[in-house]
Image (cartoon, grey):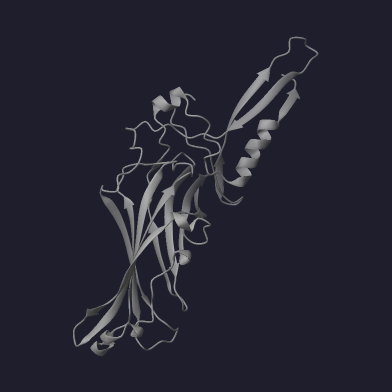
């Protein structure tokens, strides 16, 4: 590719609001006899820009500094509950990195702290008094990759948001063995006025491999990538949500690797099915036309 600041292959949004970027090689085989048509081949290919900054580490060190994203919410057992509310706090930890490379395992940590409604001190004698809210199980945790896209055309700006696939083997993932957990047994925490709360905690550890095209800004399209964390507890409106990002994703491909050739990344890039179909179709297409 030429030494230009080109954006990656990309597609997002709908026919009304969205955009796409595709790359093709157009080859013309010139046939000398004037009465024979030339052969033209359109070959599409996925593209990621080279990371021209210092090469990122091969794997983040879990002992390095972490960046925390925290959110809290009141949780009611019933819609018209008048018996007090419980509290849930979520903490999402991501290694503090100036650049997050694609195709490499990035460790993450999630912590959930659940506290019961305010109870009299006599309740400290029996954990049975702690019935709500309890810590979420792995399958109830939704961790998804999200993309925001701003399209500028003819002086107008419009946004589109896309929720992509689940991350970190949470939710309905078929690979629950990729997640480690540690539960801290419920313990009593005294408050003032002879009252207190039952508190329960759980930590989850997992790994994310990012495969989405890196975010970019051009004259007509600007994109950013986030993680969305959402946990739904029993009861109406009991949802705790957190947005993590924007994520500083880079291809992780250094100029020396690009020059030496690191192999095809086509199977690795997470592109929309419609764009992949067009790529496959264009790879099979040979057209005959006059020059």
Rendered residue at 61%/46% (across/down)? 273
Rendered residue at 77%/18% (across/down)? 37
Return the residue nearer the eye: 37 or 236. 236
Q: Is residue 105 left or right of residue 62?
A: right
Q: Quadrant of residue 123?
A: bottom left
Identify the image quadrant of the C terminus.
top right
Residue 129 at x, y = what percent?
34, 85
Rendered residue at 65%/41% (across/down)? 277
Q: Is residue 102 above or below residue 122?
A: above
Return the residue nearer the eye: 151 or 56. 56
Residue 15 at x, y = what percent?
61, 50
> Is residue 165 among what the camera can see?
yes
Return the residue nearer the eye: 290 or 207. 207
Return the residue nearer the eye: 228 or 13. 228
Q: Is residue 30 left or right of residue 110?
A: right
- Residue occupying the far top of the picture: 32
- Residue occupying the far right of the picture: 35
Residue 255 at x, y = what percent?
40, 27
């Amino acid at each position: 590719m030429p030494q230009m600041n080109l954006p990656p292959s990309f597609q997002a949004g709908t026919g009304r609001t969205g955009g796409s970027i595709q790359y093709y090689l157009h080859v013309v085989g010139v046939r000398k006899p004037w009465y024979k048509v030339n052969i033209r081949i359109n070959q599409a290919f996925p593209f990621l820009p080279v990371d021209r900054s210092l090469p990122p580490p091969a794997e983040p060190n879990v002992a390095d500094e972490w960046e925390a994203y925290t959110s809290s919410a009141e949780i009611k057992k019933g819609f018209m509950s008048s018996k007090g509310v419980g509290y849930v706090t979520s903490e999402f930890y991501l290694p503090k990195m100036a650049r997050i490379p694609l195709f490499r395992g990035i460790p993450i940590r999630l912590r959930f702290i659940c506290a019961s409604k305010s109870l009299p001190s006599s309740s400290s004698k029996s954990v049975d008094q702690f019935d709500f809210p309890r810590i979420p199980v792995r399958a109830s945790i939704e961790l998804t990759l999200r993309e925001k896209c701003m399209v500028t055309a003819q002086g107008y700006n419009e946004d589109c948001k896309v929720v992509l696939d689940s991350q970190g083997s949470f939710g309905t993932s078929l690979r629950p063995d990729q997640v480690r957990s540690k539960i801290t047994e419920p313990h009593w925490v005294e408050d003032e006025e002879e009252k207190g709360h039952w508190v329960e905690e759980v930590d989850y550890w997992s790994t994310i491999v990012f495969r989405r095209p890196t975010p970019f800004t051009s004259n007509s399209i600007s994109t950013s990538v986030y993680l969305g964390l959402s946990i739904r507890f029993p009861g109406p409106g009991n949802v705790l949500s957190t947005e993590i990002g924007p994520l500083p994703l880079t291809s992780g491909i250094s100029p020396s690797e690009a020059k030496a050739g690191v192999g095809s990344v086509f199977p690795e890039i997470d592109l929309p099915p419609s764009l992949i179909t067009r790529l496959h179709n264009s790879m099979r297409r040979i057209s005959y036309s006059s020059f």
